[in-house]
Amino acid sequence: MSFTFDRRNFLRFAAGGAVGVATSGVSLKGISTLNAAIDSELVRVPSGPESWATGVCNMCPGGCGLRVRLIGNRAVKIQGNPLHPINRGGLCPKGLAGLQELYHPDRLRTALRNTGTRDNPRWKGLSSDEALGLVSERMRKLRDAGEARSLVVVDRQRSGLLPRLLSRFMTAYGSPNYVTMPTGMDALQAAIYAQQGVSEQVAYDFSNSRYVLSFGVNLLEGWGAPVAMMRAFSRWRDAASGRRAKLVQIEPRFSMTAARADEWVPIRPGTEATLALGMAYVLISEGLYDADFVREHTFGFEDWRDAEGNSHTGFKSLVKSEYRLNDAATVTGVPADTILRLAREAAQNRPVLAIGDRHNSSLPGNVYAAMAVHSLNGLLGSIDVPGGVLVQQQLPGQALVSNAKDPLLPSAQTHVANAGELPQAIVSKRPYPMQMLLLNQVNPVFALPNGAAFRSAMKDVPFIVSFSAFLDDTAVLADLVIPAPTGLESWQDGGTPPTVANAIVSISPPAVRPRKDVRHPGDVMLSVARSLGGSLAAALPFAGYEEFLRNEVNGLYTAQAGAVFGSTLEDSWNRLMERSGWWAPSYSNADELWQQIKKQGGWWEPAYSHGEWSHVLRTKSGRFEFYSQALADLAKQRRRTEKIEDRECLPHQPTIPEATTNFPLLLMPVEQLPLAGGEGAHLPYLQQIAGVHVFANWDSWLEIHPETARTFGIGDGDSVWIESGRGRVQARARFYEGARPGVVHLPLGYGHKSGGEWACRGVNPLEIVEEQPDPVTGLPSAHWTYVKVYRA
C-alpha cells in the first residue's frame, strides 16, 4: 500500500481519530508507515522544558481564556483557563481546534500583492515592511487630497481593546467609517433599542433565571458565548443546588438545543411573534403580569394620547383584539392549552427570560418579532433584575471611544451603519465615493446573505487591504493581503462577549514565536500612524500593540474598580466587597495590575448593580416602551410625514410569504457548533465532528423529512439539487425526522471558494437565499426562501 505521509495528511488522519482508522481500510503496513512518519524529522516530537502560558481564544466572539502547554517553544496542548470568568476551565470544540489553526499548512507565509486584476489575480510576495509602506503611502495620498473620509474599515463584531484602537485611528485620520460585520443578534439589539433606548449589548442572567423561553434561538449550538451558555445550562441541571430551571425551546426543527431542552414546542415557521403575543394575551387576561412594573416603568401599555391630542392604540388593546388564544393557536399550530400552560408556568416561575426572535450567529431575525418576545420580559418584570434581561457594562473609559451606535440609523456622515449595507453604498457612491477599504479578519463575501453583491461592489473600490491568515473568499479579491497571526502568536485581547453583563478584559502575551511573517493589525495601524505623523501620531503615541494594551490597563487601574481574574471564592469575596462599597484589589499600582493580568488572564467587574433605571431605560419616556417612540421617529424621518400607523410602533406578527407551485419547500439554513458563525471549515477536526446527528461530515447535506422526501421521489443519500429563484446548489439528502414536513435545512459554514484545501467543501446556502432587507434596520435578511428539491 502506498501511504505518502506529510503534515497535511497527518492533520487529516488526526481529525479522523480511531473511527477513521477503523473504517478507512488502512492496513497494518499503513499503520507502520504512520509510526515511521511520526519518528521522522517531518513529524518530530518536540523537546525541551515544559511550561504553561495564558491565552485568549479568538475562534468565536466568546473570548474564552486559555492555558497553553508548551514543550520547548512548541505549543502541544490547549485547555481552558480555570480563572477566566467566562469558561472557568471549560472549552468548546472550536477552542480545542486552535492548534490546528496555528499549524495549518495553508496559512499565508508572507504578505501578498495582486499584480493582476480582481478577476484574474497574480500574487507577488512582499515583506511585511514593504506591505506597511504601501498602506502608509496610500493613506497619505488620500489625506493630502482631502479624501480621508473615503477610507472605510470593516472589523469583526466584537468587543475588546483593538476596536478602541481602530476607532481612535479612524477619528484622528478623519474618517467616520469604522463599521463592523452584522450578526444574528442585530435585529434583537434593534428591538432592545426600540423598547429600552440602549445601544449597548443586551445581556441575559441565565444562571439565576428559573424559566427560559427560547423562541428559535440555538442556545447550545454556537449562540452568544458558547461555553458560558453551556455552563449556565449545566447549572439549570444541578441537582445538588436544590433548584432546577426549565428550558422551553420553541422552533420548527428538532435541533440540538430542542433535544436538550425540558420541552420542545414545534411551531409553524415564522409565527414566533404570534405565539409570544398569544402568551401575552393570557398574562393580561388572567392578571398574571407584573402590574407594579408595568405601572411604574412602562409606556404604551394602555391606550394613550400624544401632546397634540391624537389617540394611539396601546399594547394591551392590540393583544386583546388581534392575538386571542384560539387565534394564536390556529396561526402557530401550537395547541391552545399549550400556550395557556406556558404562560401560566412563566408567571409562576419568575424570574423569566424570553429570548428571540429566531436567529443564529450570522442571520438576524425580525425586529417586530423580537419586540413581541421582549415584551414578555416587560410584562413579567424581568428587566434589570437577577435572572432577567440586563445591559452589558461598559469598560472604564469606553464612553470616550464608544462603538455603540443607534442600531436603527447610520450617522449622517457615515456610509452605512454596518458592513451589510456597504455594497449599495459603494455602487451608489453616496454620500461620497469609497477610495480605500481595510478588512480586519472578516470574510463578507462568504458570510453575508448579500455576499455576491459585496463581491461585485469590491470591483469599484480602487484599493483594498485584507488582514487575514488565509487567502479566503474576500481576501482573494484584495489588492494587498497582510497575514494576520493566530491568537497564540501575538498579543491578544478580548472583551465582554455577547449576552454577558459583566465588563471583561482578557489580555495575553504571545505563547509561541510567529511561524510566518505576520503582523498584528494593531501593530500595523500603529506603524501607519507613526509614518503619517501629525495629529494621527499624536493620538496613537505607542511603539506597538503591547504598549497600547499597557496604556489601557493604566486606565483600568485609574478607575479604581474591578478585580483580576481569580478563583470562584476570590470572585465571590470581591463581589461582596464591591456591593458593600469597598474596593480591595490584589495590586497596589498599575505595574502590579499589568503583571497580574498577564499571569492570570485578565480583569473584570464581578459585581452588577440592578435597578439603575436611568441606565437601562433610556427611551424618550424614560420607561420600557411597548409602544416604541423611537420607531415612530424613525418612520417620520424616513417618510417625511407626521402621520404613521400605530402598528409600526408596536410588536406584531410580520407578514409570512407563502410557498408557490414552482417553489413549494421552505429553506431554513441551520447552524452547527463546530462551524458556528461561518468559521472553522478549514480545520479538519471541526469538519469531522459536524453533522453527527445525520451521520454526515466533510460535506454539506440537506435535512429533509422522510414524508417530504417520498412526495418528491427522493431517497436517503440521494444527490439532489436545491433550487431557488436565485440559483441552485447540490447536496446529499439526509432523512431527518426532526425536520418539519415542507421545510428543508442546509447547514451554514460550508461552501468556501477559497481559503485552503479543507475549507472548499460543500455548498453555501447563502448563495441561494432570497435576500430581503429588514424594513426597520435595513439589514440583509434571509429567512424566507422557498425552493424546489429534485434528484441530480
Image (cartoon, rainbow, N blue to C red):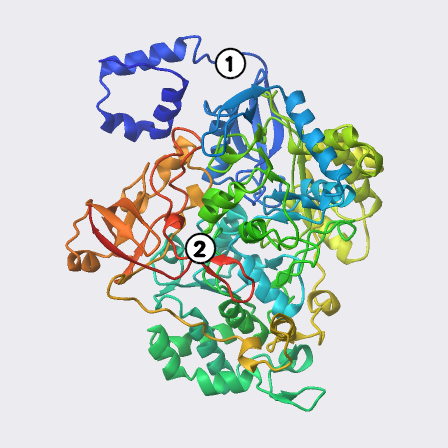
Q: Are marks 2 and 1 in contact (CB under 8 Å)?
A: no
Q: Residue at x 56, y 43 (%)?
A: 87
Q: Position of residue 206 (x, y in %)?
A: 55, 58
Residue 46 has which mark?
Answer: 1
Residue 165 visible in the snapshot: yes
Q: Is residue 139 left or right of residue 690?
A: right
Callout 2 secondary element: loop
Judging depth in this view, the residue of 561 and 130 nearest the camera is 130
Q: Quadrant of the N terminus?
A: top left
Amino acid found under the numbered disc labelled 2: Asn
* Residue at x 44% of width, y 55% of height: 218
Question: In the rendered image, which quarter contains the C terminus?
Answer: top left
Q: Is residue 75 visible?
A: no
Name the residue that disc number 2 marks: 218
Residue 77 lies, in percent from the top left, at: 51, 26
Q: Residue at x 50, y 81 (%)?
A: 283
Q: Is residue 633 above or below residue 480?
A: below
